[in-house]
Image (cartoon, rainbow, N blue to C red):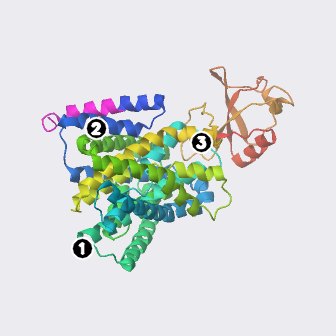
Amino acid sequence: MLNENFLLVGALLLFVAVLAGKAAYRLGAPALLLFLGVGMLFGYNNFVHFDSTEFAEFIGMIALCIILYSGGMDTKFSEIRPVLAPGVVMATLGVMLTALIVAGFIYAVAPFLGIELTLPFAMLLSATMSSTDSASVFSILRTKKQGLKENLRPLLELESGSNDPMAYILVVVLTGILTDGGDINIWGALGTFLVQMLLGAGFGYGFGRITVWILNKINIRSNASLYSVLLLACAFFTFSLTTLAYGNGYLAIYIAGLVVGNLKIPHRNMLRTFFDSFTWLLQIVMFLVLGLIVDVHELLSYDVLFMGIGIGAFMIFVARPIATLISMSPFRSFSTKARLYVSWVGLRGAVPIIFALYTVTHGVENSEYLFNVVFLVTIISLVLQGTTVSGMANWLKLSFMEREQTFKLTVPDHIRSEFSEIEVNNAMLKGGKTLKDIRLPGHTLVVMVHRAGNYFVPKGDTELNKGDKLLVVSDNNDELVNKVREMGIEDIIKM
């Protein structure tokens, strides 16, 4: 059916997935979970037949590249700078600790379930699930539009965007051990880790700078849409050439996206819109394909079901909290509630399943069992943790409502003046209610007012009311921010 009506089936899957995503938003569930569910539904009893693990792994690799690149582009370095150290520690030491703790649990519990597992296999099984999933974390945190205190949002996004390389290296090394006879070479593994991380970071930064230089030097303004194609090509060049040089491509592409997103490039807003749409498309396709490839009957077998439930519960309630508390112990600026929340938002998603597919395509013994267990743990994580990301933040009193942007404005990159949105309060009106009575810094103009659903251009004698939204343009935004904060306005939205 899939071979004869590829476009029809593909269109139907995408359509149903988008509807599922809308339903997920209303229900407060992760959209990616329902995408996965749609794939499993259509793959049940081979209604849509798909069994190519190599193609599924390839789709996952492409999707993960774009997700990481887009996530890096959307991350402001000014936001992650304060949490850079804890983010890096969580992405490296946190992953390692999670893998070791879970591996010990698997090796200890397997005999009680009548399952024979070697220690290297238990380590490989835990390594595939040791990193949090960037696709899940990015999509949930950004869809919720919920603010988090103590810089938790940039910390979680930095961790999820940069911890895949650590898990990937563990999976590659342990896969090599299991396919080469089972001998563990600690020094060889450490050397591989250092080489991959150093080359990945170096190539990522270097290719990021080269990409910015190319985008600024090449002139294709006659067809600005080609900038998206050019940036896409640069992203894939970054990943593939870093991988060929034995560096970690996933780390490289995230850092390259971070560099590109924080330096001046032409058509920035258009490029971000393109990558955001493309990211959602690839996420949908990836989760649909992963859902199609799983065998539900194998997923519900005794050995998979009990092992998966046991690992899922242990990882969520024991391993992740212990790893988080140890990794974040040197950083005293975070409250106990913040540490608990970080330990809770350790979502698993597509990445562990892709790593599990890697073991299948590389011929690891019992890799089909490993894949099914990882798939079940991912579902448990998305159901239990993914649906409570917002509720847990509210319960721990770490959340605040982000004010929705009233003025939907796209500012060209070559305009140096900055646009901001502020809300009128009583302190602003103390000196008078007309616009000319409001003492704003020089080189600052109020260009539009929003009141009760209506927009209008103000004049000097326009009377302002508490709650009015003002669109302000200034040549010195820092001076504007300081001035309005003197009036008790902290919530300033930059366009």
Residue 57 % position (x, y) = 27, 53
Which region shows up in magenta?
A: 1-17
Q: Residue at horizontal 55%, vertical 47%?
A: 414
What secondary structure prevails in the magenta region? helix
Q: Is residue 8 magenta?
A: yes
- Numbered mark located on residue 40 in the image: 2
Quadrant of the drawing holding the N terminus: top left
Give the distance between the C-alpha atoms of the residues marked 3 and 1, in whole angstroms.
Answer: 46 Å
Q: Earlier in the sequence, mark 3 or mark 1?
A: 1
What count of labels does the image hold? 3
Q: Earlier in the sequence, mark 2 or mark 3?
A: 2
Q: Quadrant of residue 32?
A: top left
Say which residue label 3 marks. Answer: 393
Residue 229 % position (x, y) = 35, 49
Q: Amino acid at mark 2?
A: Met
Label 2: which secondary element: helix
Q: Is residue 408 above or below residue 286?
A: above
Looking at the picture, tell me which residue is in the foreground, 55 or 376: 376
Looking at the picture, tell me which residue is in the foreground, 325 or 210: 325
Residue 189 % position (x, y) = 37, 74
Instruction: Say left or right for 366 vs 486.
Output: left
Quadrant of the drawing holding the C terminus: top right
Query: Are the residues at dot 1 and dot 2 in contact (C-beta closer than 8 Å)?
Result: no
Q: Is residue 420 above or below residue 346?
A: above
Label 1: which secondary element: loop
Q: Quadrant of residue 130?
A: bottom left
Query: Is residue 20 visible to the viewer in this orientation of the structure?
Result: yes
Label 3: which secondary element: helix
Q: Is residue 132 magenta?
A: no
